Image (cartoon, helix red, strand yellow):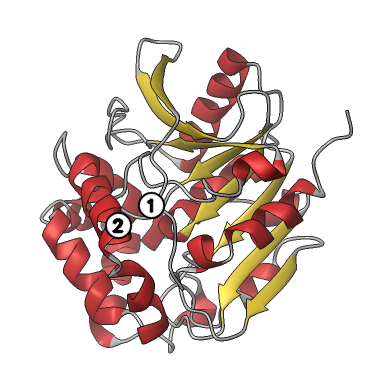
Amino acid sequence: MTLRVIDPVRIGAEQLPGGRRLGWAEWGPVDGVPVLLSPGAATSRHLGFGGDVADGLGVRVISLDRPGLGASSPRPGRTFGDFADDIRAFAALRGLERPLMVGNSQGAPFALGCAAAGVVGALAVVSGADEIAAPCFGDALPGELRRLVDLAVSDPAAAEKVFAGFTPQAMWDMVMSGSPECDLAVYQQPAFAAAYRRALDEAFAQGTGGYARDTVLAMGRWGIELSDIDVPVDLWYGEKDTGHSPDQGAALASRIPGAVRHLVPDAGGAVLWTHAEQVLSTLLKHAPST
């Protein structure tokens, strides 16, 4: 499959209450249905998705830099709740009301936190990082990952220092070495690879603190009341994706009232890009009527 990689059509940053900046990039019509994107690990706002179908669907995809990544100001010690507050403020500043949202990979728990806080109107979790520190996954993790998860739970500050040693190249190497062939066929396309490498470099432009904080939050116990989520949630996993969730989101879906899990045949972790139109079309069914 050859993917079209579309540069953002609009880019900017909003000043949040208190003076911090939140960077964003947009695809699709300016009056389209707003869909916020919480991107994957260590990537910036520039790596969006669905740019080639957004106009046809009438969708305005808005990718966001989390604090300390890309163009967004750092927020040391932040929590999932803090991120939800930032998104609530961003939505108010941009006049988005309760937008739809997509959480990809490590961006998934941040998006779930927004759903639990009532900030968004519906959510698609795509190749979402699972709560691997949950007891049900105790025996499912390989040894080194288990060690890092245990450290994130028992000593988050020490874990954050470990994750702060990561680099854009290390992230690239980890993804390329751990992905199935169906994903490598996407990631190694020259245009996609260039966009991905750019997003990695931008994400680390302020240093490693933003990525480190993201990772210690995602790898520890989330503290998100998933049972409180009262908006539609769809979870999308490729059947060949073994890296984001030990059970491809089955337990995660069971913890979210009314959640619908989609297991995509012959796909891996790149579902956000290989099935962008399907993800967005399904999400749009939950948009408020106008």
**SS type, badge 2:** helix
Residue 38: x, y in percent? Answer: 48, 45
Q: Nearer the viewer, residue 257 or 151?
A: 257
Tell me residue 261's x, y (percent): 70, 71
Residue 190 percent location from the top left of the image: 25, 63
Q: Nearer the viewer, residue 61 or 55?
A: 55
- Asked if one can make out residue 223 in the rendered structure from this viewpoint, the answer is no
- Report if residue 267 is visible in the image: yes
| Label 2 environment density (alpha carbons within 10 Å; few <14, some 14–19, many ≥20) | some
Per the image, the residue denoted by label 1 is 217
Is residue 172 placed above or below 1 in the rendered structure? above
- Tag 2 or tag 1, which sits nearer the N-term? 2
* Residue 57 image offset from top left, x and y in percent: 70, 44
Circle 1 residues within 10 Å: few <14, some 14–19, many ≥20: many
Residue underneath mark 2: 191
Which part of the image, by quadrant, shows the C terminus? top right
Tell me the SS state at disc 1. helix
Q: Amino acid at mark 2?
A: Ala
For the image shown, how many numbered marks are present on the structure? 2
Residue at image point 36% right, 10% down: 19
Q: Quadrant of residue 11?
A: top left
